[in-house]
Amino acid sequence: MKRYILSIILALTFTAIQAQKVGYVDTDYILSKLPEYADAQSQLDAISAEWQSQMEKRYQLIDLMYKDLQAEEILLTDDMKKKRMEAIKSKEKEALEYQRKKFGIEGELYVERQKLVKPIQEKVYKAIKEVSRASGYAIMMDKAGATTLIYTNPKYNKSDAVLKKLGFDPEDQSEF
């Protein structure tokens, strides 16, 4: 009797596992097809390049201050050297603060990225959810994410279905 019950439980468990559909998407691929994502990336790249240029100017000034100090060091009194070093250290501190403010973990670049990219990602995730539900998938994984998929059968790739749900033709080969 115990074997019979165990057999039924195993059969039901195996059937339940078999009934679950699993699919995957590649969000990097999906995002690369969206013109609004390309626009957001361009805006972020321009902002980042401007701030990086400002950083380089600050560090060039600091480098110039060091070189001037070294060139004039023998002519300066100890008090003058100390004041110059304090000015250099102050500029270095300002540069590091600027870098942290612009590029830090919660910096302005992060805030801009959240403002520009997050709504697009949410739209994509909503479309993934809708495609998953409409197709009866219990699990949908992201091939582009941290999950390592050793092998994927292309028939379970639902990236093109998500693009269609977003109103884009996955066959369109133009890159944005």
Image (cartoon, helix red, strand yellow):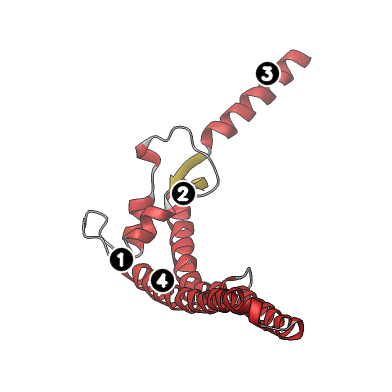
Image position, residue 58 (x, y; %): 53, 79
At label 3, the amino acid type is Ser
Earlier in the chain: of badge 4 and badge 2, it is 4
Q: Which residue is mark 1?
A: 167
**Contact flag, marks 1 and 2 (Cβ < 8 Å):** no
Residue 59: name its quadrant: bottom right
Earlier in the chain: of badge 1 and badge 2, it is 2
Describe the element under mark 2 as helix, strand or loop. loop
Question: What's the mark number on residue 45?
Answer: 4
Describe the element under mark 1 as helix, strand or loop. loop
Q: Which residue is mark 2?
A: 144
How far is the residue under mark 1 from the one under mark 2?
21 Å
At label 1, the amino acid type is Gly
Question: What's the mark number on residue 7?
Answer: 3
Residue drawn at x 55%, y 43% as measured from the top left: 147
Earlier in the chain: of badge 4 and badge 3, it is 3
How far is the residue under mark 4 from the one under mark 3?
60 Å
Task: Locate the C terminus by quadrant.
Answer: bottom left
**Dot 3 surroundings within 10 Å: few (below 14), some, or many (20 or more)?**
few
Q: Residue pushed farthest front? A: 75
At label 2, the amino acid type is Ala
Residue 149 against residue 79 in the figure, above or below: above
Mark nearer the viewer, 1 or 3? 1
Specify whether residue 17 is in view: yes
Earlier in the chain: of badge 4 and badge 1, it is 4
Mark nearer the viewer, 4 or 3? 4
Mark nearer the viewer, 2 or 3? 2
Residue 47: name its quadrant: bottom left
Image position, residue 129 (x, y; %): 49, 58
Earlier in the chain: of badge 1 and badge 3, it is 3
**Dot 4 surroundings within 10 Å: few (below 14), some, or many (20 or more)?**
few
